[in-house]
Amino acid sequence: MAAQNNTSISPATANPIVIFDSGVGGLSIFNSIQARIPGLSVIYCSDNAGFPYGSRPEAFVIERTRNCLMKLVERFDPALAVVACNTASTVALPHVRSQLDIPVVGVVPAIKTAAQVSRNRHIGLLATPATVERAYTRQLIDDFASDCEVTLVGSSELVHLAEDHLQGKVVAPDALEQVIAPFVDNFEKDNGPDTIILGCTHFPLLSKELAAVAPQHIQWVDSGDAIARRVSSLISQPAVNSVPEHKAVFTGDIPVNGLVDYLQRQGFELEGLNG
């Protein structure tokens, strides 16, 4: 009789986690979590019916985030939820944490990390206009980068470019050059920012493309690794050989475009939030 293979792969048995965003930006967080915890099952929810959050009133974002997460918790019984949207994290976290009995991890711009790694004490923040203007962001700068010069650039266009990128559309380099144009004058000076924070979860999806149109000495930082470490510390680890079961859930119509192909290549099954 042939010996049995003791390293056979078993299905995942632990509760999944939820990653929630208004669009596809949270997939950058998914990539970081999957790299650290490859056997973890993920329910990825895109509130595409409410997209984009960056230009919405705070009350709208709070209500959408709260309602969606409550439905997801009831339906999937997750071990933890990640609000993988900077806008939602800065306005809705206290509200959802008070109503859910699972840990809720938020995403904020990696200002602390940027200040730690900057060599010349000049950092840049590339985020949505709402994040750039929010008092929460200013407080992060005061708390963690008070000794740095900080150049702030807000872009809604980059959110849409990232969405296009995951749908398989080509993002023109000149479009990215326009987005980072407010940094350019500083790039050409000796004291320009040497570190730029990708302060929206959509933006790391274009990190390679952004780096290609910027000076080579620029360091790009985001929150993905920090969020993955935090999630790992809060949940029971899946078995080493477990096979994750991923679902991508949409609050609006399930898209019919290159995004579907991308999600299916990542192992996601697609469905609507309401069934």
Image (cartoon, rainbow, N blue to C red):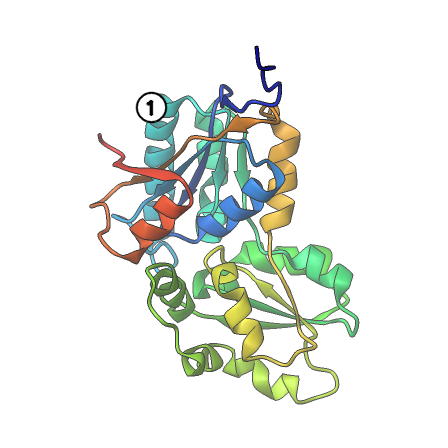
Position in image of residue 251 (x %, y %): 26, 41
Residue shown at 38%/70% (left/top)? 157
Position in image of residue 226 (x %, y %): 64, 46
Residue shown at 49%/58% (left/top)? 200
Residue on which the image places disc 1: 75
Position in image of residue 193 (x %, y %): 68, 76
Q: Is residue 86 left or right of residue 249?
A: right
Residue shown at 20%/46% (left/top)? 253
Q: Is residue 122 visible?
A: yes
Res. 190 image quadrant: bottom right
Quick one: which residue is furthest to the front in this view? 1
Q: Closest to the observer: 189 or 4? A: 4
On screen, residue 240 above or below 263: above
Q: Is residue 85 visible?
A: no
On screen, residue 27 above or below 273: below
Quarter of the picture containing the C terminus is top left
Residue shown at 52%/60% (left/top)? 204
Quarter of the picture containing the N terminus is top right
Q: Closest to the observer: 9 or 24? A: 9
Query: Which amino acid is tagged 1?
Result: Arg
Tag 1 secondary structure: helix
Q: Residues within 10 Å of mark 1 (few under 14, many from 20)?
A: few
